[in-house]
Amino acid sequence: MTTDDLVRHLRMSRVTIWRKRAAGSFPKPCKFPGGQLRWKRNDIDNWVAKLPTHDPVAPVPPPPSSRDFGRLL
């Protein structure tokens, strides 16, 4: 996959992809002659599958208890 393919597939900007690459939190590309970079689709799909499903920085609110239900009305 090219960088343009990644932008469309991941719905991320080129800048975000390059920042994640620089931080070491993105799959490594294969280098081809002439400096071209390509990513294996399988590597990208595995990386996406391992991403957290929630924001690791934001606290996850606890589920409301039955005692809190009256406050919602």
Image (cartoon, rainbow, N blue to C red):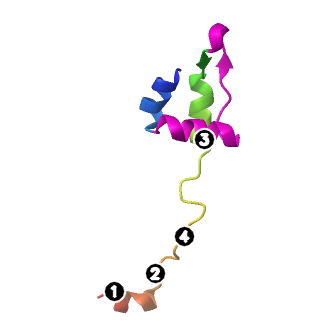
Residue 56 spot, x, y in % from top left: 60, 61
Mark 2 lies on residue: 64
Q: Which residue is mark 3?
A: 19
Q: Tag 3 or tag 4, which sits nearer the N-term?
A: 3
Pick whichever, 46 or 13, lies toward us: 13
Are dots 2 and 1 in contact, CB under 8 Å? Answer: yes
The type of residue carrying mark 4 is Val
Q: Secondary structure at mark 1?
A: helix
- Lower sequence index among marks 4 and 1: 4
Disc 3 marks a residue whose amino acid type is Arg
On whether residue 23 falls in the magenta region, the answer is yes
Q: Nearer the viewer, mark 3 or mark 2?
A: 3
Using a 10 Å C-alpha cutoff, classify the residue at mark 2 as few (fewer than 14 neighbours), some (14 to 19) or many (20 or more).
few
Sequence-wise, which precedes: disc 2 or disc 1? 2
Q: Residue at x 50, y 34 (%)?
A: 14
Q: Judge left or right: residue 6 versus residue 52.
A: left
Callout 1, which amino acid? Leu
Identify the residue position indicated by label 4 in the image.
Answer: 60
Gap between marks 3 and 2 measured at Cα: 38 Å
Spatial CA span between label 3 and label 1: 42 Å
Labels 3 and 2 touching (C-beta < 8 A) = no
In the image, farthest residue toward the left = 73
| Residue ID at (53%, 41%) | 16
How many angstroms separate mark 2 from mark 4 (CA)? 12 Å
Q: Which residue is mark 1?
A: 72
* Residue 70 x/y as whole percent: 35, 92
Residue that appears at 60% across and 23% down: 39
